[in-house]
């Protein structure tokens, strides 16, 4: 038995794709009469800057012996990897079996959430006694080892059926009938997802890069993705492979707190909206989230904290800005997230949220959020019950007074807010989904969901 891990064989400009190389290696193993038990497509930390596109690494489990497997994979990488590109640094790891040590499984988990050094991968391969080889600086060893350890490291898996183009067509415009994709996606939903974006009427499963992929259908079940793939009218398919993947699982997210986030990592964080959403140049929508410890809000900017008034039918009432002293984190919904930005724009200061996404440059790039508690009313200057005119302040801590009739009122009035948002999870649409981000339609969330499709 052998598990072959490989990564970093492709180039942004020159094409190629490590999944294609893995499909070719799997085909060659079968030609030689070996069994291929599974091919894994593992998505690694999406915040890694070395990635060509989706930060993928591959693992193939076969009954072939390790020596032969290593030789065959090495030849395939030598022949196909785009090593003329200085950013392509292939790595190959061959392990005896998928039943790797806890230390290797831990390496896989860290490759999703942290950043690792090439030396870490070499050391771990040596310590485990795995055969390995790096080309150029060998950075691909990180992903290759992570793929080898992934079966033990993760419990949640999905599948993707990838169809590849004939080599003579690589780099040319793809011929795929969009109507057939929409029809197949409709029939396959919800067992298959992110095939199309109905809201933008966009085909999502067909890449735009010069790589060999024709389309990839993602879902929960191998039969479902195969049926959708078979129903797509397109140019001839050279080969197709079904991969076991961690796509759509949120395996990259870790629970954290706003005060302790680091750039280049992916989090699930809770907090209170601390500034009104603002649409900036380019159509990106920003707001600040304050640490959850700030469950109080300032009173008229005076700096005195007042607790949230929950007497109003148990709902949140908001006055002004959230506590300015609590640690804050900017959150952004980028322009390509399209209609998701309307959900973000519907947020108000004081709303209680859980947000998910990558922290980069001190800003969290939103993948999804859950509205946990919404501000339902706001404090406003009272209206005189006699004259129906706006009252004015009677002085510090002296309430309000009507200038015309002298009517007095102790404090501000409460006005009910019409909220265009419900409690629960909201997500970016399929067109803007990160590979590893879990679509709400997959279920298992801790609040009601509002899936996009
Ligand atoms: P494609 O999507 O087309 O397969 P890619 O986006 O997977 O390409 P690669 O060419 O594989 O990109 O480059 C990513 C590189 O980053 C690989 O060398 C991989 O080993 C390395 N890498 C992945 N995750 C980490 C991590 N957590 N820490 C450090 N390096 C990483």
Image (spheres, grey):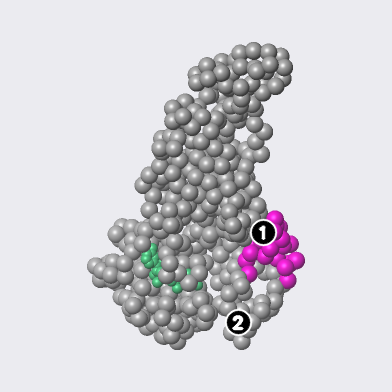
* Residue where numbered disc 1 is placed: 197
Decide which of 261, 231 is in the foreground and name it: 261
Q: Where is residue 171? Give x, y as percent.
A: 60, 82
Say if disc 1 is inside 8 Å of ligand 1: no
- Count the marks: 2
Estimate the spatial distance between the alpha carbons at disc 2 and disc 1, rounded to whole Å.
24 Å
**Quadrant, the N terminus:** bottom left
The boundaries of the magenta stretch are 177-206
**Quadrant, the C terminus:** bottom right
Q: Residues within 10 Å of mark 2 (few under 14, many from 20)?
A: some
Q: Secondary structure at mark 1?
A: strand
Q: Where is residue 288? Give x, y as percent.
A: 49, 45
Task: Find the residue positioned furthest to the left.
Answer: 127
Q: Is residue 233 left or right of residue 220?
A: right
Regarding residue 436, the answer to whether it shows in the image is yes
Q: Which mark is residue 171?
A: 2
Instruction: Determine the quadrant in which ligand 1 lies.
Output: bottom left
Q: Is residue 187 magenta?
A: yes
Residue sitting at x 52%, y 82%: 14
Q: Secondary structure at mark 2?
A: loop
Q: Is residue 105 magenta?
A: no
Q: Where is residue 164? Give x, y as percent.
A: 59, 76
Q: Residues within 10 Å of mark 1 (few under 14, many from 20)?
A: many
Regarding residue 125, the answer to whether it shows in the image is no
Residue 169's image quarter? bottom right
Decide which of 359, 438 is in the foreground and name it: 359
Residue sitting at x 65%, y 67%: 229
């Amino acid at each position: 038995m052998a598990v072959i891990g490989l990564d970093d064989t492709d180039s942004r400009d020159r094409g190629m794709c490590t999944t294609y190389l893995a499909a070719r290696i799997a085909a060659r193993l079968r030609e030689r009469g070996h069994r291929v038990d599974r091919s894994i497509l593992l998505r690694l930390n999406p915040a890694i800057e070395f990635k060509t596109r989706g930060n993928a690494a591959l693992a193939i489990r076969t009954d072939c012996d390790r020596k032969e497997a290593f030789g065959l994979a090495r030849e395939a990488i030598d022949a196909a990897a785009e090593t003329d590109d200085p950013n392509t640094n292939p790595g190959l790891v061959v392990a005896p079996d998928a039943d790797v040590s806890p230390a290797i499984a831990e390496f896989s988990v860290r490759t999703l959430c942290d950043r690792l050094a090439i030396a870490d991968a070499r050391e771990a391969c040596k310590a485990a006694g795995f055969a390995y080889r790096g080309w150029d600086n060998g950075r691909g060893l990180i992903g290759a080892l992570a793929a080898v350890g992934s079966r033990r490291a993760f419990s949640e898996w999905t599948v993707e059926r990838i169809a590849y183009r004939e080599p003579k067509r690589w780099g040319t415009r793809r011929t795929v009938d969009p109507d057939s994709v929409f029809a197949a996606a409709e029939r396959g939903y919800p067992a298959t997802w992110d095939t199309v974006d109905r809201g933008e009427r966009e085909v999502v499963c067909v890449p735009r890069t010069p790589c060999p992929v024709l389309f990839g259908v993602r879902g929960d079940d191998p039969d479902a993705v195969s049926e959708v793939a078979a129903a797509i009218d397109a140019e001839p398919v050279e080969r197709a492979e079904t991969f076991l993947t961690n796509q759509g699982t949120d395996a990259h997210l870790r629970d954290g707190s706003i005060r302790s986030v680091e750039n280049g990592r992916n989090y699930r964080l809770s907090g209170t909206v601390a500034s009104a959403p603002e649409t900036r140049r380019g159509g990106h929508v920003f707001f600040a989230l304050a640490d959850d410890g700030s469950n109080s809000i300032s009173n008229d900017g005076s700096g005195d904290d007042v607790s949230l008034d929950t007497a109003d039918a148990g709902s949140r009432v908001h006055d002004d800005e959230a506590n300015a002293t609590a640690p804050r984190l900017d959150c952004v919904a980028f322009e390509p997230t399209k209609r998701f930005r309307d959900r973000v724009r519907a947020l108000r200061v004081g709303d209680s949220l859980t947000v998910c996404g990558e922290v980069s440059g001190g800003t969290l790039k939103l993948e999804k959020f859950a509205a946990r508690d919404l501000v339902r009313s706001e404090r406003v200057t009272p209206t005189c019950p006699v004259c129906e005119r706006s009252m004015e302040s009677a002085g510090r801590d002296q309430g309000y007074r009507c200038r015309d009739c002298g009517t007095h009122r102790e404090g501000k009035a409460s006005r009910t807010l019409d909220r265009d948002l419900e409690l629960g999870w909201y997500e970016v649409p399929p067109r803007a989904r990160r590979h590893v981000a879990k679509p709400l339609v997959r279920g298992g969330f801790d609040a009601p969901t509002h899936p996009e499709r």
